Image (cartoon, rainbow, N blue to C red):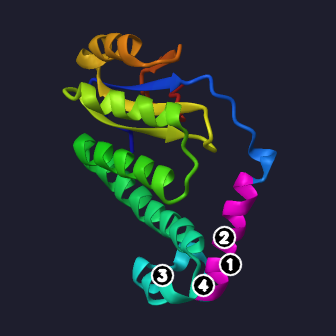
């Protein structure tokens, strides 16, 4: 089924903050999730937020928040796929925003520059569906779903207010490769 985004575009904004996933921060998050999974007795992909809450007292605060991010992100991903299939870009954008909040607050893999870009992007308002950090975190890029007619104004807004010197990549969604029957 083709992706229908109308005139919406994807804006990738590179903060130029370099991240090093080998520093141990990411492995600490994986260990916290693994410990939470052992306590819950199921893989986090099979756990519910209700199960997590039922074991709250057995988990450290860090284990709880890391697991909460993973479990809720799985739910958001399913809801986002459904929103895209329904052509509901507003709902999809809301889920992007919620994802960033969870990555920032529960998984703690954002950084001040990413948070600043997300806040500035959302403050632009009209035409911005949603935005979030992307990748492993601790730096890198944001990805934003924005109405094509709002792109120029958003770029001016970010250039005027963001403290860093970002690089912008505008992506025009298109159908991917597909097989075509050739009639001879």
Query: At 43% across and 31% down in the image, what residue appears?
Result: 116
Mark nearer the N terminus (4 vs 2): 2
- From the top left corner, tell me how far across and down residue 70 is, in percent: 53, 64
Disc 3 secondary structure class: helix
| Residue corresponding to mark 4 | 42
Q: Which residue is mark 3?
A: 52
Q: Quadrant of the C terminus?
A: top right
Q: Residue at x 30, y 51 (%)?
A: 83
Closer to the camera in the image, 39 or 177: 39
32 inside magenta stretch: yes
Residue position for label 2: 32
Asked whether the residues under the numbered discs 4 and 2 touch, taking CB atoms below 8 Å apart as contact, a structural biologist would say no
Mark 1 or mark 4, which is nearer the start of the sequence? 1
Query: In the rendered image of this protein, does residue 83 appear above or below residue 116?
Result: below
Residue beneath disc 1: 35
What percent of the width, then of the height, locates residue 62?
Answer: 58, 69
| Image quarter in which the N terminus is found | top left
Q: How many C-alpha atoms fall within 10 Å of the one at disc 1: few (<14), some, or many (≥20)? A: some
Q: CA distance from mark 1 to mark 3?
A: 12 Å
Residue 177 appears anywhere in the view: no
């Amino acid at each position: 089924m083709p992706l229908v985004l109308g005139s919406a575009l994807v804006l990738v904004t590179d903060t130029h903050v370099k991240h090093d996933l080998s520093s141990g921060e990411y492995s600490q998050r994986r260990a916290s999730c693994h410990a939470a999974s052992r306590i819950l007795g199921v893989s986090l992909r099979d756990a519910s937020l209700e199960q997590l809450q039922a074991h709250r007292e057995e988990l450290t605060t860090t284990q709880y928040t890391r697991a909460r991010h993973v479990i809720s992100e799985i739910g958001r991903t399913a809801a986002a796929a459904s929103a895209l299939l329904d052509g509901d870009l507003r709902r999809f954008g809301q889920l992007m925003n919620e994802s960033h909040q969870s990555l920032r607050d529960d998984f703690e893999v954002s950084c001040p520059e990413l948070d600043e870009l997300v806040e500035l992007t959302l403050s632009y308002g009209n035409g911005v569906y949603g935005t979030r950090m992307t990748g492993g975190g601790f730096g890198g890029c944001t990805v934003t779903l924005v109405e094509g007619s709002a792109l120029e104004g958003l770029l001016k807004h970010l250039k005027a207010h963001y403290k860093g010197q970002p690089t912008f990549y505008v992506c025009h969604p298109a159908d991917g490769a597909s097989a075509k029957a050739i009639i001879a």
